[in-house]
Image (cartoon, grey):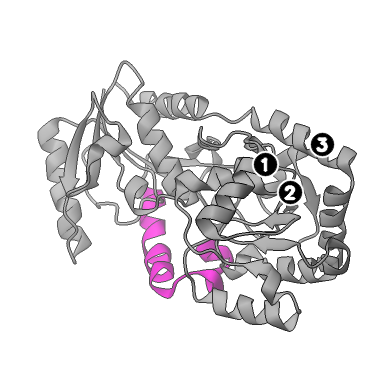
């Protein structure tokens, strides 16, 4: 069976949940025997970085009119004898006329649930295109049962048309000794302080970072003036407001925004942390808590949306609207060595159930359901 996969998200969105999903899926598919794969990648991209050896790949040059771009991709697939097409990044800009089965990974329907948290242009595209996409797709893949329920509810998709396949942390996330990691952060990023509380995951309102700042302020007296809250991430409009809130809470000098951190440096950030906190209000999956757990970091999340399902017994779950309660959980983990060790072990045990090898094999089974 010859299968085409739009792999451009692995390049465009690297470092995000969708980027990680696409990157690891592509790498895994190249190692799957029995099928022939063709990957679409941005024109000029050095495909060796994705290790697509043994598979073909086709460059796609961006065009202001996405329909021109997609017409080129359809023509390329027809000429190559493709029998199935998979779009791993929500299916946006899916061509209207494809002569073979289409699989779409729809990660979540946040634009329907929390539209105020979405970029306006993305929101318009998503709401306009998704009804056509879910209607045209022969099968949808999503990343949690919670997300599947949302898709069924908001888009009236038959449940049997949706396969749940869990994503997983990347293999780079493993336990590292804390002292060298702290030295790395100090030398590379100028970050000092202890205890070190870490948050990774972006600054959208739904991520609930304001509550984390309030919880840090509540815990400040007991944590001490050397404690730091470190929040790496790309520059975003929300950061100015978060800085102002930190100043108003009198923790401005203890909250660190180091900016964009390349994926290869993130394991050292996790390794340096005393606790990882992720109080998000809504996730279709929630990759950062699993990354932290895989690194052996005691992890605190909210019990909201898919997080309760995904982190299970491996993380301490708290009310995402209760800042004093979150502060109490942070202090408990930091001050109680027995609780910290237990949480660290539960996280490492729990995260073992997730693997990209398993996710890729389950994805191939979805493909094979459409083979002649």
Question: Is residue 112 inside the magenta stretch?
Answer: yes
- Name the one closer to the observer, 106 or 23: 23
Q: Mark 1 points at which residue?
A: 178
The quadrant the C terminus occupies is top left
Q: Mark 3 points at which residue?
A: 341
Q: In this view, does 91 lie above or below 229?
A: above
Residue 169 image offset from top left, x and y in percent: 55, 38
Q: What stretch is highlighted in magenta?
A: 109-135
Q: Left or right: where does residue 134 sit relative to residue 158?
A: left
Do labels 3 and 1 touch, CB within 8 Å? no
Q: Left or right: where does residue 15 sit relative to residue 196?
A: left
Q: In which quarter of the image is residue 195?
A: bottom right
Is the residue marked by circle 1 packed among few (<14), some (14-19), or many (20+) residues within 10 Å?
Answer: some
What separation in Å lies between label 3 and label 1 (alpha carbons)?
14 Å
Give the mark toward the camera: 2 or 1: 1
Do labels 2 and 1 touch, CB within 8 Å? no
What separation in Å lies between label 3 and label 2 (alpha carbons)?
11 Å
């Amino acid at each position: 069976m010859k299968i085409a996969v739009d792999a451009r998200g692995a390049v465009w969105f690297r470092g995000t949940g969708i980027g990680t999903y696409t990157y690891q899926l592509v790498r895994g598919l190249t190692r799957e025997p029995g099928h022939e794969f063709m990957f679409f990648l941005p024109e000029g991209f050095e495909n060796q970085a994705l290790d697509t050896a043994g598979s073909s790949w086709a460059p796609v040059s961006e065009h202001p009119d996405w329909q021109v771009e997609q017409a080129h991709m359809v023509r390329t697939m027809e000429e190559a004898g493709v029998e199935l097409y998979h779009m791993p990044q929500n299916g946006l800009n899916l061509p209207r006329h494809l002569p073979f089965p289409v699989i779409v990974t729809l990660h979540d329907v946040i634009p329907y649930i929390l539209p105020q948290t979405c970029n306006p242009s993305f929101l318009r595209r998503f709401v306009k295109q998704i009804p056509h996409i879910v209607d045209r797709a022969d099968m949808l893949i999503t990343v949690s049962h919670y997300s599947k329920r949302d898709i069924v509810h908001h888009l009236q998709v038959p449940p049997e048309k949706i396969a749940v396949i869990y994503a997983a942390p990347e293999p780079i996330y493993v336990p590292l000794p804390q002292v060298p990691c702290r030295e790395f952060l100090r030398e590379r990023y100028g970050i000092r302080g202890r205890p070190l509380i870490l948050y990774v995951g972006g600054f959208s309102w739904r991520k609930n970072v304001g509550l984390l700042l309030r919880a840090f302020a509540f815990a400040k007296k007991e944590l001490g003036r050397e404690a730091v809250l470190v929040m790496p991430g790309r520059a975003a409009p929300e950061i100015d407001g978060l800085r102002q809130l930190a100043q108003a809470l009198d923790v401005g000098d203890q909250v660190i925004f180091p900016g964009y951190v390349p994926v290869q440096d993130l394991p050292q950030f996790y390794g340096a942390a005393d606790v990882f906190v992720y109080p998000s209000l809504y996730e279709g999956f929630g990759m950062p808590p699993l990354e932290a757990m895989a690194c052996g970091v005691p992890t605190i999340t909210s019990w909201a949306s898919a997080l309760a399902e995904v982190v299970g017994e491996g993380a301490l779950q708290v009310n995402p609207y209760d800042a004093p309660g979150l502060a109490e959980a942070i202090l408990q983990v930091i001050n109680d060595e027995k609780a910290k060790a237990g949480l660290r072990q539960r996280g490492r045990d729990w995260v073992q159930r997730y693997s990209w090898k398993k996710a890729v094999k389950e994805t191939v089974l979805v493909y094979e359901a459409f083979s002649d």
